[in-house]
Amino acid sequence: MDPVVVLTLVAAIVVVFLVASAVRIVPQARRYNIERFGRYRRTLQPGLNLVLPVADRVNTKLDVREQVYSSDPRPVITEDNLVVNIDTVLYYQITDPRAAAYEVADYLQAIDQLTVTTLRNVIGSMDLEETLTSREEINSRLRAVLDDATGKWGIRVNRVEIKAIDPPATIKEAMEKQMRAERDKRAAILHAEGERQAKILTAEGTKQKDILEAQGTQQAMILRADGEAKAVELVFQAVHRNNADPKVLAYKYLETLPHLASSDNNTFWVIPGELTEAVRTVTSAFGDQATAGPPKPAQTEEAATADADGTSHESRIPELDAGSTVSLDAATAADEAEKEAAAAVSDAKAEAEAAMSPQVPRRGQTSGD
């Protein structure tokens, strides 16, 4: 083979190698640290970059995206001397690739150890109950310490979260019993409150019911009393408007007497003192009608004369002789009524009904003659 051709081929291969070594393509969200003869030169940005072949070389390739680091469970002693295992989750991002490569040998291990140390310092000042209920405070204190320490390493800690806090099995069992007792207590309190509220509502309903029933009874009694008052008033007005005869009043008085003993619970009843006077009045009235008899011819003539004069014969009051038997019959009826009230009342009622029934007019008494 011709030596010239061989040299040409070798030169071409060397040129291709040198060009390939001089060109560096950096992906997005990556950073390359370049060293020239073992000394940091610069950091390559994403895209096409040119370097000196043989003199420059890539030392570290770093990912500047936010990354997640989960640590293993670490035992931590609380203030009340209880050992708990705590897992943490760390969210960090490289902000300075040069510092991340040259300020710390292994930034992940450094962050992990710093997290454990800070966590033990924070948890050591809290008891178990406070540790379980103060996760936000623990996260804030961890983030403040890590962010301050990792700033010179070119790393920014965005968030630190406690993933799990595992107390010992005996502590878990005691906590479960405590929580169960608390739930039972709350359930008993709620049940008692419910019963109390139910009793209060029932009492209020009963009270409202009694009040409404009392008001209804009151209104009914008032209306009944008003009705009775109006009825008595109407009867009183009717009696006075019609100018009732004392005989009718005495009859009505006697008519209501049997109702005094109508109840089965009455063992005795009192007869008013006015009974004798009422019986005497009724008996006198009916005795007058019984002894009056048919009108005499003289009376008939007088009645006809009175009709002719335009005066009514009803306006004349019959005069009774002193020797008639009317007064004797009235006195006898009154004495008998005093001795035997029930019999007198029934007799007076029968006579009153007979007297109040319409009588057939006799010849010579018609007013049309």
Image (cartoon, grey):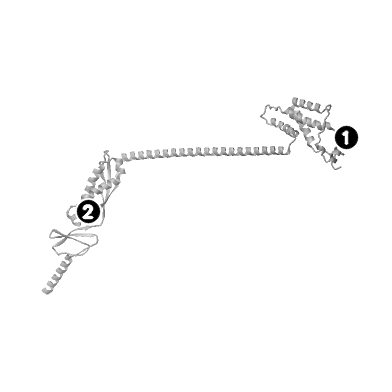
* Pick the front one: 271 or 141: 271
The answer to whether residue 89 is left or right of residue 290 is left
- Residue 295 image-quadrant placement: top right
* Pick the front one: 83 or 291: 291
Cα–Cα span, label 2 and label 1: 154 Å
Q: Is residue 77 above or below residue 272?
A: below
Q: Is residue 164 visible?
A: no
Measured as percent of width and height from the top left, residue 368 is found at 85, 43
Measured as percent of width and height from the top left, residue 221 is found at 61, 37
| Tag 1 residue | 298
Measured as percent of width and height from the top left, residue 158 is found at 26, 52
* Pick the front one: 153 or 169: 153
Residue lying furthest front: 309
Which mark, by number, is residue 155?
A: 2
Callout 1: SS: helix
* Pick the front one: 18 or 122: 122
